[in-house]
Amino acid sequence: MTIRLRAHHLLCMLTYVGKGYSPAFIANYDAIAGRLAREDILLVAGPDDICAPLLGDDDCHCHEQTVTERDARATEAISNLLARPLRPGSRIVLDANMLSTMRRAFAAGKTRQACRECEWSELCSEVADGGFAEAKIAIR
């Protein structure tokens, strides 16, 4: 199978520790976290597999301009980091080396421009500062 992710979620997954918008959101994200070690990622524009539990909520932010802009900044930052152009439709196979590379860049602030104005930014900084020890995504 394939996991559908929007670009900024490629950064969010680096620091995911099991917190989120609702119990349904967390359960869904936990399931996706477990699949990342064995399934490829398809980059999509707009709501993705992580957003799924939020789409019925009246206050769902998945279609807001600020989130779309966050995706654009994440696409640029990750494309530069991986030295490969990314766009919706691109496929990524996440392995231990790529996860480590992405986490080092995130911790160093090289890909954090996409996190501007994100309500989870402080939590993500704490996770990165702690060496990602609490992060749920692990690939060996």
Image (cartoon, rainbow, N blue to C red):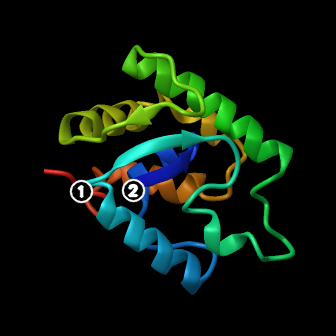
> Residue 50: percent from the left, percent from the top?
55, 62
Closer-to-camera residue (122/34): 34
Q: Closer to the camera, 118 or 99? A: 99
Residue 112 locus on image (x, y percent): 54, 35
Q: Do the residues bearing badges 2 and 1 touch, measured as CB atoms within 8 Å?
A: no
Characterize the local packing of mark 1: few (<14), some (14-19) or many (20 or more) Cα atoms within 10 angstroms: some
Using the image, determine if residue 114 lies above or below residue 60. Answer: above
Q: Nearer the viewer, residue 38 or 66?
A: 38
Residue 72's place in the image compared with 31, above or below, is: above
Residue at (69%, 39%) from the top-left corner?
A: 70
Q: How many marks?
A: 2
- Considering only vertical position in the picture, is 124 above or below 106? below
Identify the residue position indicated by label 2 in the image: 127
Q: Of helix, strand and loop, which one carries label 2?
A: helix
Task: Mark yes or no: residue 135 visible.
Answer: no
Residue 130, percent from left and from top? 31, 54
Q: Residue furthest bottom?
A: 23
Tell me which corner region of the image, top left, top right, bottom left or bottom right, holds residue 104: top left
Q: Residue at x 84, y 43 (%)?
A: 65
Which numbered tag is attached to residue 43? none
Under mark 2, the amino acid is: Val
Say whether residue 19 is left or right of residue 67: left
- Front disc: 2 or 1: 1
Left or right relative to 99: residue 22: right
Check disc 1 and report the residue beneath it.
138
Farthest left residue? 140
Q: Amino acid at mark 1?
A: Ala
**Residue drawn at 52 percent across, 24 percent down:** 86
Percent of width and height locating residue 3: 44, 54
Residue furthest to the front: 1
